[in-house]
């Protein structure tokens, strides 16, 4: 990507001291993590994500919803941060007052070099009890001494037993049970109260974590540039964060291959994929810089 828009966006970034980088699912698209707009795959294509991501869906069918999140968590585990994630880390490394705010529940910002993004919608890696909110271990993180997963085809438990599908034994319990199973999966029970464990994400109809929302509004209110990357800006209250920055006079630069409701408030709209545009933007701001 080149051209006057990129040069202008580069100028705005080079002049910034307190930038906010606000990201959505498009940020991780080039890492192979489907966006909410993308069609779901396999069993899940029968379901609308906005219906599955609700307390009502979990109450109605905990195994279906837990299975969906386990499938997404496995997908993210197999994914790698893309050059866009690394460019965001390069901006934060160069400008220490950068605040990264994400709607994503994957951990690719952290793995891409941004240690503590503000997480508006939670994480796939922070399960907790659906009743007492006690943090729960990730199924795959169960210590080896924990009782082995239920044999699901009458074969011996996995540890040391014959491979159950004739193939080489997979490495470790995690890659076994969850890998083989891409459907409904009973959520573990809370070690304290026995209630089902739920994913540590914010479901539709649920309030955002107040600390994260407050930190996001504060950062957007005090920023001197807001970079919005890969969001359709349709989910609230997250979609209001770029508006807070614009209302207080900060320039907003958007990275998205297609127009969104944010176009009108943006000083510059960079039409392209984050994995290509963000490294180019870092180089436009700081020629010769390592874009991560
Ligand atoms: C609440 C976690 C009340 C779970 C998520 C005001 C107006 C209208 C509706 C509402 C409103 N206020 C509240 C609502 C209701 C609702 C809402 O916003 N509904 C929408 C759909 C109309 N909001 C809520 O329910 C919120 N809670 O309001 O609670 C309350 C208050 C107090 C007390 C009690 C209750 C909670 C919302 C959070 C829901 N959880 N995620 C999970 O992930 O499973 S939202 C989830 O969807 C994501 O986190 C993300 O936020 C959203 C998806 O949006 P995007 O990230 O933007 O992704 P999308 O797929 O849409 O678009 C991708 C974009 O990337 C596209 O533009 C595409 O062009 C672009 N792209 C693609 N490839 C690339 C790219 N860009 C760059 N590079 C590429 N390569
Ligand atoms: Zn509990």
Image: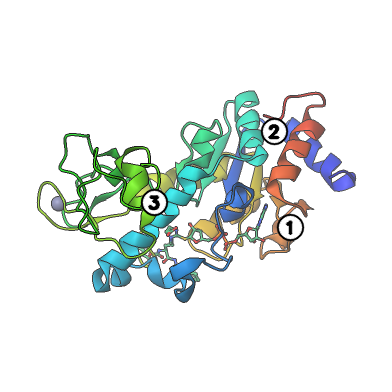
Q: Position of residue 169 (x, y in %)?
A: 36, 42
Answer with the quarter of the image where residue 59 lies: bottom left
Nearer the N terminus, badge 2 or badge 3?
Answer: 2
Answer with the quarter of the image where residue 146 lies: top left
Position above or below: 87 against 198: above
Q: Nearer the viewer, mark 3 or mark 1?
A: 3
Local SS, label 2: loop
Residue at 84 percent across and 45 percent down: it is 1
Question: Horizontal placement of 33 versus 43: left or right?
Answer: right
State the residue in front, 217 or 146. Answer: 146
Q: Position of residue 250 (x, y in %)?
A: 67, 45
Residue at 19 percent across and 46 percent down: it is 134
Q: Return the residue at label 3.
A: 179
Image disc number at residue 257: 1
Image disc number at residue 69: none
State the residue in front, 185 or 208. Answer: 185
Q: Return the residue at label 2.
A: 16
Residue 131 visible (yes or no): yes
Q: Could you tell me if the residues under marks 1 and 2 are in contact, i.e. CB atoms within 8 Å?
A: no
Q: What crowding class fits label 3: few (fewer than 14 Cα within 10 Å), some (14-19), or many (20 or more)?
A: some
Answer with the quarter of the image where residue 135 lies: top left
């Amino acid at each position: 990507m080149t051209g006057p828009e990129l040069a202008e966006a580069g100028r705005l970034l080079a002049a910034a001291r307190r930038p906010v980088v606000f990201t959505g699912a498009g940020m991780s698209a080039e890492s192979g993590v489907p966006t909410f707009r993308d069609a779901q795959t396999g069993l899940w294509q029968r379901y609308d994500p906005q219906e599955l991501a609700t307390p009502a869906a979990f109450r109605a069918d905990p195994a279906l919803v837990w299975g969906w999140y386990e499938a997404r968590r496995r997908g993210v585990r197999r994914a790698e941060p893309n050059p866009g994630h690394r460019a965001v880390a390069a901006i934060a490394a160069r400008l220490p007052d950068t605040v990264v705010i994400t709607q994503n529940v994957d951990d690719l910002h952290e793995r891409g070099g941004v240690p503590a993004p503000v997480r508006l919608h939670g994480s796939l890696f922070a399960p907790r009890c659906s009743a007492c909110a006690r943090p729960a271990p990730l199924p795959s993180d169960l210590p080896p001494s924990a009782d082995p997963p239920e044999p699901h085809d009458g074969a011996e438990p996995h540890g040391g037993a014959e491979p159950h599908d004739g193939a080489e034994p997979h490495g470790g319990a995690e890659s076994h049970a969850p890998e083989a199973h891409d459907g409904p999966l009973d959520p573990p029970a809370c070690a304290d109260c026995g209630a089902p464990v739920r994913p540590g994400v914010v479901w539709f109809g649920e309030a955002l974590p107040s600390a994260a929302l407050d930190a996001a509004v504060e950062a957007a209110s005090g920023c001197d540039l807001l970079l919005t990357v890969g969001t359709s800006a349709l989910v609230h209250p997250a979609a209001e964060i770029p508006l807070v920055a614009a209302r207080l006079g900060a320039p907003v630069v958007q990275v998205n291959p297609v127009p969104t409701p944010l176009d009108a408030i943006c000083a510059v709209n960079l039409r392209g994929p984050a994995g290509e545009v963000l490294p180019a933007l870092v180089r436009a701001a700081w020629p010769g810089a390592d874009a991560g």
